[in-house]
Amino acid sequence: MPIIDGHQITISNPDKVMFPADGITKGDLVEYYQRIAERMLPHVRGRPLHMNRYPSGIGHIAIQQKRIPDSFPTWIKRATVDLHRGGTITHAVIDNAATLVYLANYNMITAHVWLSRIVAPEQPDLLIFDLDPSDDDFRLVRKTALSLKTLLEELRLVAFVKTTGSRGLHVVVPISVAPNFEDVHVFADFVAQRLTASDPDHLTTEFIKQKREGRLFIDVNRNAYGQTVVAPYSVRARPAAPIAVPIAWADVEKDSLRPDGVTMRNVWDWLQGRNDPWEQMERMRIPLPRLTESDKPNRSGRRRGVSRPERSGR
């Protein structure tokens, strides 16, 4: 019965197997989240939580849970947000290691968080590109991520990257709090369309899977109110228990990189000697570049340019 952040937490059934093929138990999951909390917390603190729960382990019923149960202890932070279709919903918020441990004991394998914080839920401070391949050609994912980084640098934006623990990569851009999600989505779509136009044979922004014709999907649809993204350092509910880990851009250049290569079994070896590649993210926030009339689609459907913001202060 560990005491974490001054809170006594009972770990129920720690020997329950959560990943049958790998023998990973709930006790292992709890221990992982307790150890990783120092790295993970800066990236999830203050963001509404969506829980991906497996009460009987992976391969069994999955529960996608947004609303915080009344049974949760009062010390777990809560955030009540507008549903935008009438009514409100109250989420849990991961603000300390004790909450992470409590959630792991609650059979949460994966944490998904908002792109905005509870202080301004309608105003995102992150922009995300989800690079989703149509096949197992991870070379194309890596190449696209590097091209996207270059394009964003041309717009004076600093990009960060993480593996998804699945098949692709997430390219994430920290921004000063944006006016609204619509502005962020429009800007992200502009960038995605511009990158796709440079290699239409291999890249697409086509949402309908059957129309992608084997091309890599640059997905910007998570840039919307109430949408979530897998949290950095979160475990995925897949065989081998892969982890979505922030990585350095130098890692993306390596042929050995795999999107699901870091797992609960090797994560501590992976992290040894590595600082968090995202530790400078807060210092890199700048206002979202302003789209101009010239950025609107021309007859070919392609946008052309963007006003570049000046860095001020940081």
Image: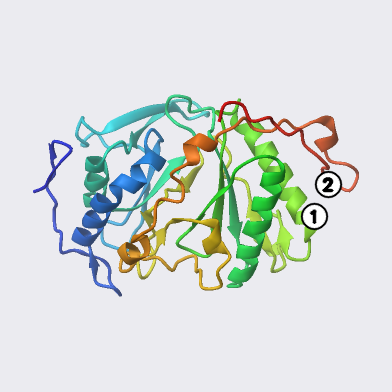
Q: In this view, does 91 lie above or below 163?
A: above
| Kind of residue at disc 1 | Ala
Instruction: Point out which mark residue 138 bears.
Output: none
Residue at mark 1: 197
Q: Which residue is drawn at 19% across and 34% down?
A: 73
Please tell me whether mark 1 sits on a helix, a strand or a loop.
helix
Which numbered circle lies on residue 302? Answer: 2
Q: Say left or right for 199 vs 171.
A: right
**The one of 270 and 117 positioned closer to us in this rendering:** 270
| Labels 2 & 1 near each other (Cβ < 8 A) | yes
Type of amino acid at the residue the image marks with label 2: Arg
Q: In this view, does 255 lie above or below 247?
A: below
- Name the image quarter holding residue 154: top right
Q: Is residue 178 left or right of residue 56?
A: right
Measure the C-alpha gap from mark 2 to mark 1: 7 Å
Relative to 293, 216 lies left or right: left
Residue 13 appears in the figure: yes
Numbered circles on residues, count? 2
Q: Quadrant of the C terminus?
A: top right
What is the crowding at mark 2: few (fewer than 14 residues within 10 Å), some, or many (at least 20)?
some
Q: Which residue is drawn at 63% across and 47% down?
A: 220
| Residue pictured at 45% horizontal, 62% vertical | 165
Q: Residue at 41% of width from left, 42% of height from top?
A: 43
Image coordinates for residue 277, horizontal then vertical, percent: 46, 51
Disc 2, SS? loop
Which badge, 2 or 1, is on the more N-terminal residue?
1
Q: How is the image coloured?
A: rainbow
